[in-house]
Image: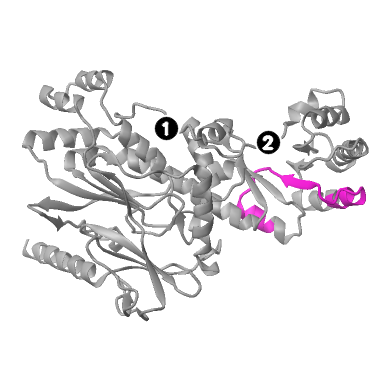
Amino acid sequence: MEMGNEHRDLSLLTDLYELTMMQGYFKEGKESIAIFDAFYRKNPCGNGYAIACGLDQIIQYIKDLRFSYESVEYLRSLGIFEEDFLQYLSGFHFTGDIYAIPEGTVMFPYEPVIKVVAPILQAQLIEPAILNMMNHQSLIATKAARVCRAADGDGVMEFGLRRAQGADAGTYGARAAVIAGCVGTSNVLAGKKFGVPVMGTHAHSWIMSFDDEYSAFKFYADMYPNACILLVDTYDTLTSGVPNAIRVFTEMREAGIKSTRYGIRLDSGDLAYLSKEARKMLDAAGFEDAIISASNDLDETLITDLKRQGATITSWGVGTHLITSKDCPSFGGVYKLAALKEGDKFVPKIKISENSEKITNPGNKTIFRLYDKVTGKIRADLISFADEHIDPSQDLMLFDPIETWKKTLLRGGTFNVRELLVPIFRNGECVYDSPPTMEIAQICKKEKDTLWDETKRLINPQKVWVDLSSQLYEVKKGLLDSMGNQKAIR
């Protein structure tokens, strides 16, 4: 049973300007229902896709969202909020709707990962927390997917807690890494909270605390015969570490001890050379099934290169570069107003910019994923209005929303359709049961299988088409034209 849903007061996990805007809306009596989209513009790490993650924490945040007496008192002490607004905050609770792409799903730029439909005061308040949780965990999940891709079927263990930017980053980052494909984590708290496998061996200090290396290995093997991975590089890997490990393994075999998981770990030096030499030594001693694991500032690039060099490593411990996504430390998700309700209809809103990639998609939207019926691979994603429907038995013309002359016709009967956004909250009540973390990991594995190999390339991957429906495109174009006309008149 997962234990990740303890109550936390995160009501002030917001930016000050959200609260000042809220007070402005409150004083004006503005109770409009707004739609905000959380999305991102560029896949992190040069990847061809990203992995949705962080929803479980967002759900708990919304469930717990109340302003305590202490929080209201703090806001009162700032001297910028009036008493009637502070009284409103004292009775605050979320009453809106939230839709989201489920965790573990592969996703692409400009798609609304999370859609909030709520009174504008409420929708404004929750922006920073939603982005904080979505951005961080989706980033680490995407980085982990790259590392696991490079490992090409070998086990990858996440063990970056001590290098993470804080306890939450280390713990929720570990969860994201396991969702994306890591076989376990060194983080015991993550194991307890999320029911994920915990793994680990011992440190160099363990070896150094004994009079000699053999004694340290022997004592450890006696305690943990079924999880006996020995760190062999404290003194000299090939002349001391590996021979002493072989001596211990031989004694275990002679004593009739059958270890289910045993081997060595390399943490320094030329990992390619050392692993190949160690493999020869282990095989010659009859330990062909011994694991050779490695650590030492690994990432997907180094793992790929080590494999190219013929390294005999079959298990990888990845820490700093994974838990911090060192080469790409931010996800870049944004939260933009898409529509305001007037009467019984949502009026689309658009943000324009000199940079075309910063122009938003207006209106109340959803996402349809189109799969090839034969292969099950993703053909394209289509962002549409929420009330649109796609009939997979009919032909569907797709076109690039920027270079509109680029078109592709999907013949009816050749593709399947899945709507990605699912309801999470309705009228402030949670209507979604988040699966256990290890179940999400299985979902993620299947999701990655829907990608073409060209999209999973670590370098220069093929982009997946994310198009707009004809109806959405025409509304967006009309809004841009009207904005352009206003600018010209001025």
Residue 385 lies left or right of residue 217; in this view the side is left
Tell me where the magenta segment starts and ends, as one range: 279-305
Residue found at x 23% / y 69%: 473
Q: Is residue 286 magenta?
A: yes
Q: Quadrant of residue 177?
A: top right
> SS at mark 1?
loop
> SS at mark 2?
loop
Residue found at x 87% / y 39%: 249
From the image, tell me which residue sits under label 2: 200
Residue found at x 34% / y 79%: 406
Q: Nearer the viewer, residue 158 or 386?
A: 386
Indicate the amino acid at tag 2.
Gly
From the image, tell me which residue sits under label 1: 5
Q: Nearer the viewer, residue 169 or 484?
A: 169
Residue 461 lies left or right of residue 121; in this view the side is right
Indicate the amino acid at tag 1.
Asn
Q: Indicate the position of residue 77 as horizontal and vertical percent values.
A: 21, 18
Q: Residues within 10 Å of mark 2 (few under 14, many from 20)?
A: some
Q: Indicate the position of residue 181 as horizontal and vertical percent values.
A: 57, 50
Looking at the image, is 88 positioned above or below residue 358? Answer: above
Q: Residues within 10 Å of mark 1 (few under 14, many from 20)?
A: some
